[in-house]
Image: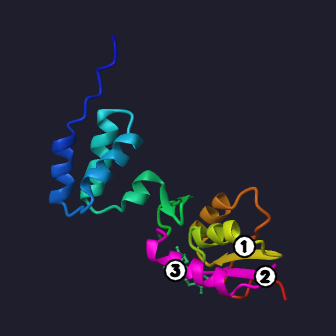
């Protein structure tokens, strides 16, 4: 038997998300639709969104400084306002700086700085194993250690 056509009711979904307090309901619906391959998946995603799960945790990624950053469950979603920190850090960094992203979370800030600077050394630190794993995934393939531990403790002398 052929699979049932997946014809989502966009207006109904927008109304549902808007009623739950999603300000950018239309945009969220498009993102959820792109993430769902069936009506069942879409309903499950919408249910969790209405229950208050952050959109980024449903999608598994967040946009940050023009980059797509993976965000695992339990890991802080990088905020748009943190782009200001990235710009400020880039502005004060001299040539070939050594940079440490303390309390890196997903590693979004580290990733954004790697894209803006040519650091001689760049590292990230977080105490939460879930954040460390997520940051390592986001920084895979780069020469950027993601260290697990309390603040400066895991850094080399
Ligand atoms: C609010 S989140 C910010 C994450 C990231 N900087 C961002 O803007 O997306 C704070 C992060 O600090 C980490 N953290 C809290 N206390 C810490 C400590 N003593 N040492 C290292 N990381 C810590 C948490 O695990 C969490 O990932």
Specify the color scheme.
rainbow
Figure quadrant of residue 89: bottom right
Q: Residue furthest top?
A: 1
Please report whichever mark, 2 or 3, sits nearer to the chain's N-terminal start.
Answer: 3
The magenta-colored residue range is: 77-103
The quadrant in which residue 111 appears is: bottom right
> Could you tell me how far apart the alpha carbons at marks 1 and 2 are, in whole angstroms?
8 Å
Query: Is the residue marked by circle 1 packed among few (<14), some (14-19), or many (20+) residues within 10 Å?
Result: some
Q: For mark 2, what is the residue?
A: 97
Task: Based on the picture, tell me whether residue 102 belongs to the magenta stretch.
Answer: yes
> Residue 112, percent across and down?
62, 68
Image mark for residue 84: 3
Picture quadrant where residue 67 is located: bottom right
- Tell me what residue is drawn at x 32 percent, y 48 percent: 45
Cα–Cα span, label 1 and label 3: 15 Å
Q: Is residue 29 left or right of residue 103?
A: left
Give the percent coordinates (x, y) of residue 32.
35, 46
Looking at the rendered image, the quarter that the N terminus falls into is: top left
| Helix, strand or loop status at disc 2 | loop
The residues bearing labels 2 and 3 have C-alpha atoms spaced at a distance of: 19 Å
Q: Residue at x 49, y 70 (%)?
A: 78
Nearer the N terminus, badge 1 or badge 3? Answer: 3
Q: Nearer the viewer, residue 155 or 11?
A: 11
């Amino acid at each position: 038997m052929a699979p049932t056509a997946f014809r989502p009711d966009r207006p109904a979904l927008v109304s549902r998300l808007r009623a739950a307090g999603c300000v950018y309901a239309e945009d969220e619906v498009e993102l959820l639709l792109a993430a769902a391959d069936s009506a069942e998946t879409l309903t499950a995603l919408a249910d969790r969104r209405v229950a208050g799960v952050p959109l980024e945790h449903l999608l598994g990624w967040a946009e940050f400084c023009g980059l797509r950053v993976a965000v695992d469950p339990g890991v802080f979603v990088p905020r748009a306002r943190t782009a200001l920190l990235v710009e400020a850090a880039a502005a004060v960094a001299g040539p070939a700086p050594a940079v440490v992203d303390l309390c890196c979370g997903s590693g979004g800030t580290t990733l954004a700085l790697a894209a803006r600077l040519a650091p001689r050394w760049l590292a990230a630190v977080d105490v939460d194993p879930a954040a460390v794993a997520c940051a390592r995934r986001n920084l895979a393939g780069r020469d950027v250690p993601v260290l697990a531990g309390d603040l400066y403790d895991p850094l080399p002398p």
